[in-house]
């Protein structure tokens, strides 16, 4: 009989009644889904939408059953991450993702229940296109456009105000002195997508308008972006400092407060484009869905579904949602079933990725899907190809997921094709198209076969490592986009990590096309600033296999708790956790002793330290080139009333700057932070102790005390 286990996961403790196998399964699902999401947002396709939804639902079910989730779980994160090289902005009104369904009966029944619960049988529904672009939040101060910000991860976005001129459909000056927050979608037409894509080199082409729209909005050079055209379509008036101007009568002011449709109409009156919509009763909703779906073939912009919202804004805005989704009455998405067509497979290409994986792509006879001509689609991996017995000349069924991304659905000649022989497979995978080295097959612990380039010096891998080194969670070198890094590599200025810190010795960079004296100076200053870093950032920057931000934090915690016993007696007493980690690897420390590190990860880390940190290697050289800012933490006060207690946190904070500051305080006093309420939780911290949120309800069911921030502070004193 297995006891309940506590898993340390990315700076959080989560309780699970499951086994190690369940946790491993969840981790694998998270990794697969996040990789698929990252690929999608970067113009690649490695997983079908059907497969993504199936895995997503499986992960969600496991989380509910085991009462914990991983910090980077896609079920708890919204959209794409913020862009590393752009300024950041914390949204005062988080942009939550919408709950969704593909079942029309479920879609309609949810609103029937919602309207019945509202007590207003005359209420109606606003049905809108769910456009597939890049969500943007626009901020106005005193009637003037102040900021344009991407949705980012829902809480923190990237400021893209410098690219406002690429967007039509939103005014830069309102006719009223008012503060306003408007949310909408920046979309690119199919025609504009084809025009821009046709002018790009083959290896720089984008998979769909959505990815090209996102890339355009986040370009640093506003002049380069200015020859592209996007449309802003408002779908929500998030907040207004006053209804004055929008509502000139008592009726208008009441409607502004109570009607979702009226608020959209008010936006249209002052110059915003508003997303195409249809107004209907709940009894007309199913027919309205069919009508808008049929009309999509004549629409110039990509759409991946429909969104319905109750018009009674005053009612729906008061309804409780979850931490990650608003209440469905404020917005519930309906995603279309996927159209399929038949074609003939003519060729299989292998597309290289930064990790060295080679992703198979089917090249087939042109077919028309959802208004565009499709000639290629992802085959995902070698295991799927084997399962489908894919051979050149086969008849394939291809679908366009949510009318956007094409995928191979079925091999219609499956029964006539033999299984893959080893000789056939070897001839099929060939060589890496980037470096020409013979490709190899990797098999995961789940038996999934992928094709990889084994060449450690493959240019594609080098670029991937350098991009990761400069990223926000790593060294955070501002302005070092992938495009900039490629230019520096191609011209011989960057060959390894440490070269970033010696760009100041290479003034000839300023004469490169696309650069200049100012950009070179900014680059040098950003690199010099990033030279001062900490343990976690540095470990993340080194691209150590299986060691991410969460594992780096776990390592640092263990080192701090055992610092004196780990430190060599001959070492000068200077706090240096990276040096201790290297010493641990050198002295054959068993990393499996650390909670959260299995045997495979432990052996891999120890071998990596031996191979990369004890010799004259790029990793060892960059270690000598940076300055560490880590300060040895004070010893935990185990005598405090917080010690040994577990705390869950929800709602807004008043006394602490953010949630992480409160977590740090709890842990410094010997307490633990948990992400969900369970029978093992000692306290729920929520300033709104009367809230009817899910966590408050569960805490009351389990008789767990709900305390405010002030209560917690009093406890610590």
Image (cartoon, grey):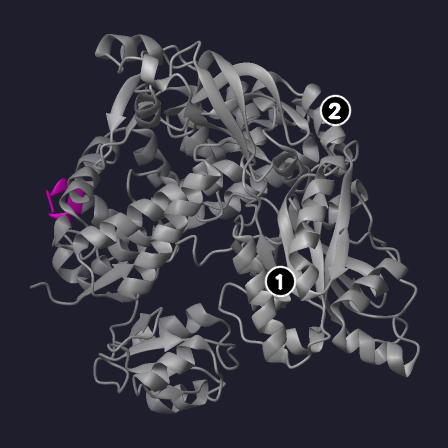
The location of residue 252, given as percent across then percent down, is 87, 76
Residue position for label 2: 195
Residue at coordinates 63% horizontally, 79% vertically from top-left? 118
Disc marking residue 696: none
Tag count? 2
The location of residue 42, given as percent across then percent down, is 54, 35
Q: Which residues are magenta?
A: 584-591
Element type at marker 2?
A: helix
In this picture, residue 147 sits left or right of residue 85: right
When asked about the image quadrant of residue 302, the answer is top right
Locate the N terminus and report the quarter of the image it occupies: bottom left
Residue at coordinates 25% horizontally, 78% vertically from top-left? 679
- Depth check, mark 2 against mark 1: the one in front is 1
Q: Is residue 358 magenta?
A: no
Whether residue 149 is visible to the viewer of this picture, yes or no, is no
Residue position for label 1: 331
Circles 2, 1 touching at the beta carbon (< 8 Å): no
Residue at coordinates 77% horizontally, 59% vertically from top-left? 146
Q: Residue furthest left?
A: 1
Whether residue 312 is visible to the viewer of this picture, yes or no, is yes
């Amino acid at each position: 009989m297995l006891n309940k286990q506590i898993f340390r996961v990315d700076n959080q403790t989560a309780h699970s009644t499951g086994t190690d196998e369940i946790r491993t399964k969840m981790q694998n699902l998270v990794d697969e889904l996040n990789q698929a999401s990252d690929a999608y947002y970067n113009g690649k396709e490695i997983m079908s939408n059907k497969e993504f939804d199936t895995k997503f639902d499986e992960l969600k079910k496991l989380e509910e059953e085991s009462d914990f989730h991983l910090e980077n779980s896609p079920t708890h994160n919204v959209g794409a991450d913020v862009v590393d090289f752009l300024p950041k902005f914390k949204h005062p009104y988080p942009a939550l993702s919408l709950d969704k369904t593909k079942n029309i009966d479920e879609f309609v029944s949810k609103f029937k229940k919602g309207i019945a619960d509202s007590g207003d049988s005359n209420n109606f529904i606003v049905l809108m296109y769910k456009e597939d672009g890049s969500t943007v939040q626009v901020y106005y101060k005193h009637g003037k456009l102040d900021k344009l910000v991407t949705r980012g991860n829902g809480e923190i976005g990237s400021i893209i105000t410098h690219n406002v001129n690429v967007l039509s459909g939103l005014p830069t000056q309102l006719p009223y002195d008012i503060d306003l927050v408007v949310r909408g979608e920046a979309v690119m037409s199919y025609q504009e997508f084809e025009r821009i894509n046709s002018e790009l080199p083959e290896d720089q082409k984008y998979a769909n308008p959505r990815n090209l729209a996102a890339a355009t909005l986040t370009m640093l050079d506003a002049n380069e972006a200015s020859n592209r055209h996007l449309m802003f379509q408002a779908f929500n008036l998030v907040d207004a400092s006053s209804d004055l101007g929008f509502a000139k009568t008592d009726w208008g002011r009441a409607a502004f407060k109570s009607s979702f449709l009226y608020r959209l109409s008010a936006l249209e009156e002052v110059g915003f484009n508003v997303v195409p919509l249809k107004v209907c009763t709940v009894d007309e909703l199913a027919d309205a869905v069919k009508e808008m779906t049929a009309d999509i073939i004549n629409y110039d912009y990509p759409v991946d579904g429909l969104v319905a919202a109750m018009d009674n804004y005053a009612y729906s805005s008061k309804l409780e949602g979850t931490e990650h989704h608003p209440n469905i009455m404020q917005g519930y998405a309906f995603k279309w079933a996927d159209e399929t067509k038949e074609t003939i497979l003519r060729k299989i290409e292998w597309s290289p990725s930064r990790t060295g994986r080679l992703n198979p792509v089917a090249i087939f006879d042109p077919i028309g899907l959802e208004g565009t001509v499709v000639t290629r689609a992802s085959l995902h991996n070698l295991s799927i190809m084997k399962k489908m017995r894919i051979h050149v000349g086969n008849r394939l069924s291809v679908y366009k997921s949510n009318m956007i991304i094409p995928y191979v659905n079925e091999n219609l000649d499956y029964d006539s094709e033999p299984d893959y022989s080893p000789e056939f497979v070897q001839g099929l995978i060939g060589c890496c198209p980037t470096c020409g080295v013979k490709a190899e097959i990797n098999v995961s612990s789940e038996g999934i076969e992928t094709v990889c380039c084994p060449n450690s010096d493959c240019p594609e891998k080098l670029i991937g490592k350098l991009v990761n080194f400069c990223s926000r969670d790593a060294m955070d070198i501002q302005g070092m986009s992938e495009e900039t890094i490629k230019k520096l590599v191609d011209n011989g200025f960057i060959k390894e990590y440490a070269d970033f810190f010696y760009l100041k010795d290479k003034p000839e960079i300023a004469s490169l096309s696309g650069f200049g004296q100012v950009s070179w100076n900014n680059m040098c200053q950003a690199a010099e600033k990033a030279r001062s870093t900490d343990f976690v950032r540095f470990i993340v920057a080194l691209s150590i296999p299986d060691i991410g931000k969460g594992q780096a934090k776990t390592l640092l915690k263990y080192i701090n708790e055992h610092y004196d016993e780990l430190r060599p007696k001959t070492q000068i007493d200077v706090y240096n956790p990276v040096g201790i980690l290297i010493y641990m690897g050198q002295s054959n420390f068993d990393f499996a002793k650390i909670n959260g590190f299995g045997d495979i990860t432990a052996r891999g880390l120890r071998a990596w330290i031996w191979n990369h940190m004890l010799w004259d290697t790029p990793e060892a050289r960059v270690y000598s080139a940076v300055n560490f800012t880590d300060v040895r933490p004070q010893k935990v006060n185990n005598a405090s009333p917080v010690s040994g207690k577990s705390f869950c946190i929800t709602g807004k904070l008043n006394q602490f700057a953010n949630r992480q500051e409160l977590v740090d305080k709890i842990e410094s006093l010997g307490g633990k932070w948990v992400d969900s309420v369970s029978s093992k939780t000692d306290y729920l911290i929520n300033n709104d102790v009367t809230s009817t949120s899910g966590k408050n309800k569960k805490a009351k069911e389990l008789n767990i005390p709900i305390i405010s921030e002030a209560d917690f502070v009093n406890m610590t004193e």
